Image: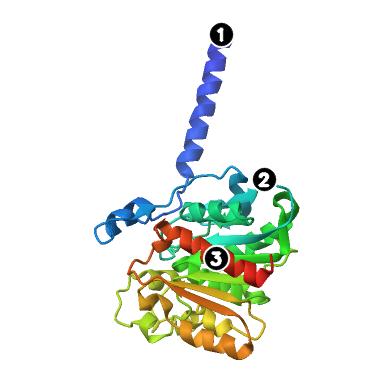
Amino acid sequence: MKKPFKIIVIICFFAFTVFQINAQNPKITIPRDTSFNVKSDYKKNIKYFPYIKPAKDSLPKTVNEQRDVVYTTLKNTPYGDRDLYVDVFYPKKSGKYPALIMVHGGGWRAGNKSLQIPMAQKLAERGYVTVCVEYQLSMEAKYPAAVFNIKSAIRWMRANANKYGIDTNKIAISGCSAGGQLAMLVGLTNGIDDKEGNHGNFGFSSDIQAIIDIDGVVNFMAPTSLNLNRKYNSPDIEWLGGSFYEKPEIWKDASSIYWANEKSPPILFLNSGFPRFHAGQDELIGMMTDWGIYTEVHKFNEEIHTFWLFHPWVNQTVNYIDNFLIKVLNN
């Protein structure tokens, strides 16, 4: 057998072996629901609000960015080793700045971190380090995986504080819709070991100093939130792994109001004209008032749930967040 022929045979054998291995271990794709995005939401709302315009991804001249930065790698998930990412926006001028981790909405099933970028850029321009976080959605992992993800991302922020100019004593969290619910739960479980998870970046605190809840439910047990006649494929039922009848302890565990205490951080509530997204809010504010903890509420009267994605409301939303953080973090 001539040498070139032998080489060809070896190459073909190697290629066939690799093919067989790949055939036996096909790459598994993480399931994603891509139905919720700015374009689809714009189409849904434009007929009722013909004057709206989507907020744009536009980097200010005074802001640096780093996108798709790995904040943790989850090992041995059903989808293999799984990287989770953040987008970071921070002032170009060196210094120590308060930071805000921002949690997108989408019914715990859809959406992605890009939904937070326009607000993140505007706030970074005002002197914040803003971190848009990816987390595991319900088609990939049920509650409380997302909570563990976000806590890990906060620890990552503190681990990388010098790199991005983060004041580790001034880290706030914001969230929109389902992200608001998550922001509340993460912020009100400061110091609760069972909520820390095992998703990496250990040795740093995940404590939060302020919370911004943008149209996110605080009590799944409240009548307007519970709505026992909902369909089984409702987003909250999917995410919590069953209906209230099946998993009442999980529904309560995921309700941030039951974790509030005398040491909870101050909270800003930004509400749409839909009361069902504010279930439990008044009761929580009453509790916080009794404890002497600052809360602030602003309402957009229009019945558009995703107001933060659009002009004319996005700039006002940013103003409310900025003014609140200046007040409670003493910038």
Identify the residue under disc 1. 2
Number of other residues with Cα within 10 Å of mark 3, as a class: few under 14, some 14 to 19, many 20 or more: many
- In the image, residue 214 sits, relative to residue 166, either above or below, namely below
Question: Disc 2 to disc 3, how far (Cα)?
Answer: 21 Å
Where residue 222 appears, as percent x and y from the top left, is 42, 85
Identify the residue under disc 3. 321
Q: Is residue 328 in view?
A: yes
Quarter of the rendering containing residue 268: bottom right
Looking at the image, which residue is at 32% across and 54% down? Answer: 42
Does the residue at mark 2 contact the one at mark 3 (Cβ under 8 Å)?
Answer: no
Number of other residues with Cα within 10 Å of mark 1, as a class: few under 14, some 14 to 19, many 20 or more: few
Identified by mark 1, the residue type is Lys
Q: Residue furthest bottom?
A: 290
- In the image, residue 197 sits, relative to residue 13, either above or below, namely below
Identify the residue under disc 2. 92
Identified by mark 3, the residue type is Ile
Q: Earlier in the sequence, mark 1 or mark 2?
A: 1
Quarter of the rendering containing residue 196: bottom right
Frontmost of labels 1 and 2 is 2
Q: Quadrant of the N terminus?
A: top right
Q: Secondary structure at mark 2?
A: loop
Looking at the image, which residue is at 53% across and 79% down? Answer: 256
Nearest the viewer among 33 and 103 is: 103
Where residue 202 appears, as percent x and y from the top left, is 72, 62
